[in-house]
Amino acid sequence: MSPLILYGVPFSQPVRAVIWLLLLKRHSFELVLTNPGSKGANGSRHPDFLRKNPMGTIPCIEEPVSGFTLGEAHAIMTYLADLNEWHDVYPTDLQNRGRINAYLHYHHRSLREASTGLVAPKVRKDLNIPEAMQAAAKRNLTGAIQVLENDFLGEHAFLCGDSLTLADIAAYVEVGQLQAEFTNLFDFSAYPKLIEWLNRMKAVEGHNEVHAVLRELGDISATAPTMDQIRSANVIALKVLKQALQML
Ligand SMILES: N[C@@H](CCC(=O)N[C@@H](CS)C(=O)NCC(=O)O)C(=O)O
């Protein structure tokens, strides 16, 4: 049977979240490289892609048999978890689920700002993100990191309890990318619980394969990578993912 299609590139944070869930659950998929923001063939703003995901963003999934398509990483992850009964990462208990959903909504104007405030200004100079927007994003991010430290991780090993859920995957692809071993764009030393959680997340199956793209790119704190370096990191990451998929 044809596998699920996932449109995106490994360098995209929300795409990484979906890939990680699929690897963790050993659910086979085909990654179709789709360039974010491009109107060209294989671009997320091309009319063919917009028919699949009118929001024009990656990730997007497509079920080959039904033709059903869906955008938005969190909608995709909750859909796949429900469809495949992955109740360990997305429990059916309404209160547990409610807390996970609360994090997934909160995420967009909080930890997601790691990309807007810190990563994108380095890797997407073409976007000319205004200084004021970068500063606001950094404030939101720092506030959210404090909320994780004090509240989400205050008494639990993971964001929504004592086991991994979709909330952890969504959060890690943003905050995890900032660690010294990857982009090296944030000093976590004032957040001991967050550091413990980051280390816990590194032991989750699929972590290394999903983050191959960042390991390949390395520390970008002093020098911004070129588009060629990002492209080449994506290509190398794709090979790592293909190997991982063959093992499923
Ligand atoms: N809220 C969306 C955000 C997706 C998103 O921002 N994707 C970026 C790549 S990381 C993108 O496709 N940008 C292209 C564009 O906006 O034109 C999700 O979580 O899936």
Image (cartoon, rainbow, N blue to C red):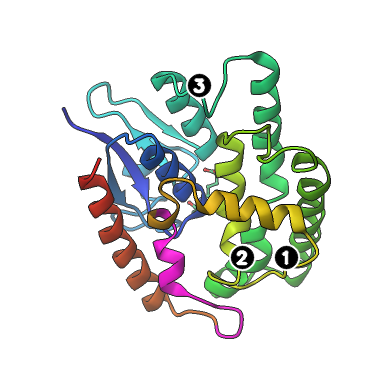
Q: Is there a contact, CB below 8 Å, between mark 2 and mark 3?
A: no
Tell which tag, 2 or 3, sits nearer the viewer: 3
Task: Give the residue at mark 3.
Answer: 87
Q: Is residue 165 at all visible to an observer of this figure?
A: yes
Q: Where residue 174 appears, x then y in whole percent?
A: 60, 54
Badge nearest the viewer, 1 or 2: 1
For mark 2, what is the residue? 178
* In the rendered image, the vertical position of residue 10 relative to residue 52, given as above or below: below
Outermost residue toward the top in this view: 93
Q: Residue at x 68, y 41 (%)?
A: 157
For mark 2, give the secondary structure: helix
CA–CA distance between discs 1 and 2?
A: 9 Å
Q: Disc 1 beta carbon < 8 A from ligand 1? A: no
Q: Specify whether residue 221 is painted magenta.
A: yes
Q: Are marks 1 and 2 in contact (CB under 8 Å)?
A: yes
Where on the picture, by quarter, is residue 105?
A: top right
Dot 3 or dot 1, earlier in sequence? 3
Looking at this rendering, what residue extends furthest in the bottom direction?
222
Start and end of the magenta stretch? 210-223
Q: Which residue is mark 1?
A: 188
Q: Secondary structure at mark 3?
A: loop
Left or right relative to 143: residue 111: left
In the displayed structure image, the side of residue 185 where residue 247 appears, left or right: left
